[in-house]
Image (tube, helix red, strand yellow):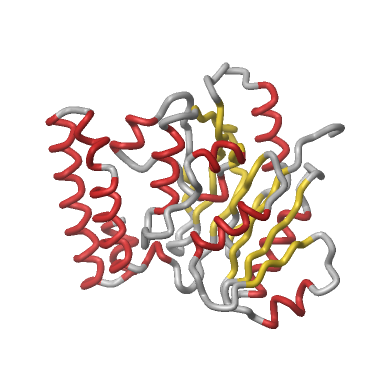
Amino acid sequence: MNNSPLVSVIIPTYKRPDLLKRAIDSVKKQTYSNIEIIVIDDANDNRVLDLFSGDETVKLLVNEVNQGGCYCRNRGLKASNGEFINFLDDDDILYPTKIEKQIDLFAKNPHQVERLGFVVCHTNDGRTGFNVTKYNKVRGDIHKRLLEKFLIDGIETVLYKKEAVLKVNGFDEELVSNQEYDLQIRLSEFYGVDYVDEVLTEEFQSTDQISVNFDKKIRGAKQIYAKHNNAFKKQGFLFTLKLWVKYRLLDIKFRLAKIVGIEAYNRFLR
């Protein structure tokens, strides 16, 4: 693709060099060629340095102490040169045509989405041990719908315009979970979204997933509700009441999950 815009793929990693290699290999196999890969090592892990020493296709940034995923993503964002950004967790992968098809959609914008700021796709989600396809069929102005519920599964499914992410100041490093959801809410205030109607990424089950850390999920849900409470109130009393009930039920579900365990949660509560 001639004169194609640069895409920066930003990958935080923490003590998982083998999984990181799989993630990076999936980026290197992209049919879209104008890509820079930025890895943020959040543990100063010599295994990561050894793995990519001499690999000029990977820009490696190292945190001397563990700072967390949101700090790493923001650091990678600041170091990036791309017009577009794809965040990728080290335990997930992109399918080969992912970036090419999303760039094509940005270029064509066939649905004339106003101020198109991010494009998504679908994902195969195996994080619970069961392979489930998550469909991200979202288009246009989705701000009110996002206030009501989570709509976009998988941070790796999204290709962002860098200017859009910078406009809303990136990730909120104070949040303990739901950071991606928070970013989508803030982005959707200013930008529209569109989607490629294909499964173009895959998420895998791994250790230390926030998605199964119920203490963090409880705290994160509380933080999100408090942070966006004013936006909820602008939608009216009934809207706010409905969300308050949903939040209380979510809190109960996560507390039950702590008691019954992850397998029961995945089967009956998720």
Residue 76, image quadrant: bottom right
- Quadrant holding the C terminus: bottom left
Residue 149, image quadrant: top left
- Relative to 12, say whether 155 is above or below: above
Q: Residue at x 35, y 68 (%)?
A: 213
Q: Nearer the viewer, residue 151 or 165?
A: 165
260 vs 143, left or right, is left
208 vs 237, left or right, is right
Q: Position of residue 210 (x, y in %)?
A: 41, 65
Q: Position of residue 94 (x, y in %)?
A: 65, 51
Q: Position of residue 214 (x, y in %)?
A: 30, 66
262 vs 242, left or right, is right
Q: Residue at x 39, y 39 (%)?
A: 185
Q: Residue at x 42, y 53 (%)?
A: 172
Q: Position of residue 41 (x, y in %)?
A: 63, 71
- Relative to 115, say whether 226 is above or below: below
- Quadrant holding the N terminus: top right
Q: Residue at x 50, y 63 (%)?
A: 69
Count the marks.
0
160 vs 216, left or right, is right
